[in-house]
Amino acid sequence: MFASLVQGPLPRLVLVGIVLVALQETLFIDLRPAAVTVQIVLALAAAAGAAAGSQQGALAGFVLGLMYDLRAGTPLGSSSLAMGVGGFVAGYSLSITVDPQWWLAMLFTGLGAAVGEGITPVIRALIGEEGHLTARLLTVVPVVAVAAMIVSPLFVPLGRWCMRVKKTDWTKVKAPE
């Protein structure tokens, strides 16, 4: 059991997640296009889903969301649920095609980030926090989605590496003689 934990995606995901959560809480607090904080951790969760599939995307989102909740002081599990849903939605790109082109992975990364960011205020409202469901979401969700799409050419391969997914190797099958 310990060997499967060490050889699975969690060690890589946690190491990359530590760096991204630190960047999220320091550098990306100051970089605010349209007065919106770019959710770089959510972008990795969505990119991991677009690279590895819906189940792996949900796992990546859950782990990264827990790490984000522990650092940011948000209610434990609220971000992990939202990022898990975002990674799951982005992972549906692999149900359309086995090996998506870069632009299709970019679109699904943006879609997953938009869903994850859009569902966050709903989750916070369900747990009793007030003031998150506002008209400002009409600005926040597109900015987060576009930022995730911009970083997806870097984050999709990173997500593939974190989740230990190898690219498909298409080989030519010889015809019987």
Image (cartoon, grey):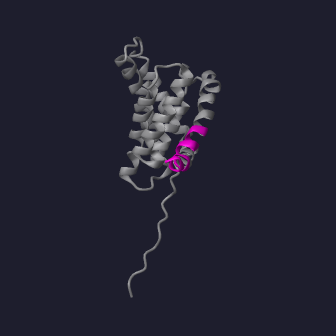
Tell which residue pokes out farthest to the right in this image. 27
Give the quadrant of residue 35.
Answer: top right
Percent from the top left, x then y, of residue 139? 46, 22
Residue stretch rendered in magenta on the structure? 1-15
Rendered-image quadrant of the C terminus = bottom left
111 left or right of 40 in image: left
Magenta-span inclusion, residue 2: yes
Tell which residue pokes out farthest to the front in this image. 1
Q: What residue is rendered at 40% in x and 50% in y?
A: 94
Percent from the top left, x then y, of residue 57? 44, 42
- The number of numbered discs placed on residues in the rendered structure image is 0
Q: What residue is rendered at 40% in x and 13% in y?
A: 129
Q: What residue is rendered at 61% in x and 24% in y?
A: 25
Image height check: is 29 above or below 172? above
33 vs 127, nearest the viewer: 127
Q: Is the magenta stretch mostly helix, strand or loop?
A: helix
Image height check: is 35 above or below 110? above
Percent from the top left, x then y, of residue 135? 40, 16
157 vs 104, nearest the viewer: 157
Image height check: is 109 above or below 161? above
36 left or right of 96 in image: right
Image height check: is 48 above or below 27? below
Tell which residue pokes out farthest to the top in this image. 130
Magenta-span inclusion, residue 20: no
Percent from the top left, x then y, of residue 137? 42, 21
